[in-house]
Amino acid sequence: MVRKPSILILGTTPSIQGPASFLEELGCDIRTANKAAEAAGICLFTPPDLILVTAKPNGVEDFVSQLKTQNKLQVLDWEMALANGEVESNSEGLEGAVTDALEELANNKTRAKHFFTKVGNKLRRIHLNDVRFIEVEGKYSAIHVGERKYNVKASLKDLLLKLPQEDFVRVSRNFVINIDRVTHIDTFQFVIKIDQDEIPISRTYKDELMKRIQLL
């Protein structure tokens, strides 16, 4: 099963309607918001592949500026691109801009095959395929690699933005798992098994997990 590109459209209701309808026809998974607080909640719990900005009402402009500064999510400022004459104001222009943004995102994630973490006075390279899961431990996130774990001072939310979304998914407030390392999912007991570790699934994140696995 190929996962649909997830796009969050920010703007006023009239500015959202046309792009939302067109992108849904192209097979994208569309969510919309016209307030910064609503958009922030969506980005926190189910981060989209792409944020498409069609207008900036109700504090959205500051929210978009913050996203761009932090470079945490892929943002396509359609409103600004139109104002600058960078794109055509039609469906072809929108499709091309969205396609380019998603391809750029895919290329960036393809290149991210490993990361480095500090262990003592050295930087240790960790391959993403070796990461089994990540859990919150106080002010740290514990990255479980094989039988070892590495504590990093970063939130799960921040780590997720740096990990390939096709491989890693949040399953509760305190756990992110590598889908490729899952051996068993108990949808009745709300538990995931990775090797000998049992990881709880929160009801809040269950639906997103089920969307991300290949079910035959």
Image (cartoon, rainbow, N blue to C red):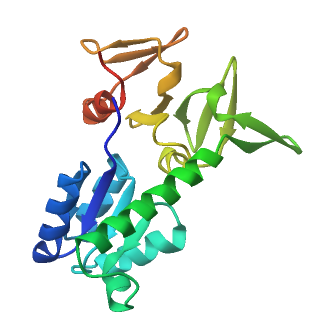
Task: Point out the residue furthest to the front here.
Answer: 92
Residue at x-position 88% and y-position 43%: 122
The reply to whether residue 180 is visible in this rendering is yes
Where is 208 relative to 186, above or below?
below
To which quarter of the image does residue 203 belong?
Answer: top left
Where is 216 relative to 129, above or below?
above
Q: Is residue 155 left or right of residue 60?
A: right
Q: Is residue 3 left or right of residue 26?
A: right
Task: Point out the residue furthest to the top here.
Answer: 196
Total marks in image: 0
Name the quadrant of the N terminus.
top left
Where is 173 relative to 100, above or below?
above
Residue at x-position 14% and y-position 61%: 21
Q: Nearer the viewer, residue 187 or 180?
A: 180
Residue at x-position 55% and y-position 44%: 163
Q: Position of residue 167 (x, y in %)?
A: 49, 34
Name the quadrant of the C terminus.
top left
Task: Point out the residue furthest to the bottom here.
Answer: 84
To which quarter of the image does residue 184 belong?
Answer: top left
Q: Is residue 124 left or right of residue 18?
A: right
Q: Nearer the viewer, residue 21 or 126?
A: 21
Q: Position of residue 49 (x, y in %)?
A: 39, 53
Residue at x-position 30% and y-position 19%: 215
Q: Nearer the viewer, residue 21 or 62?
A: 21
Q: Position of residue 149 (x, y in %)?
A: 68, 27
Q: Position of residue 40 (x, y in %)?
A: 32, 61
Where is 145 relative to 108, above or below?
above
Task: Point out the residue furthest to the right here.
Answer: 121
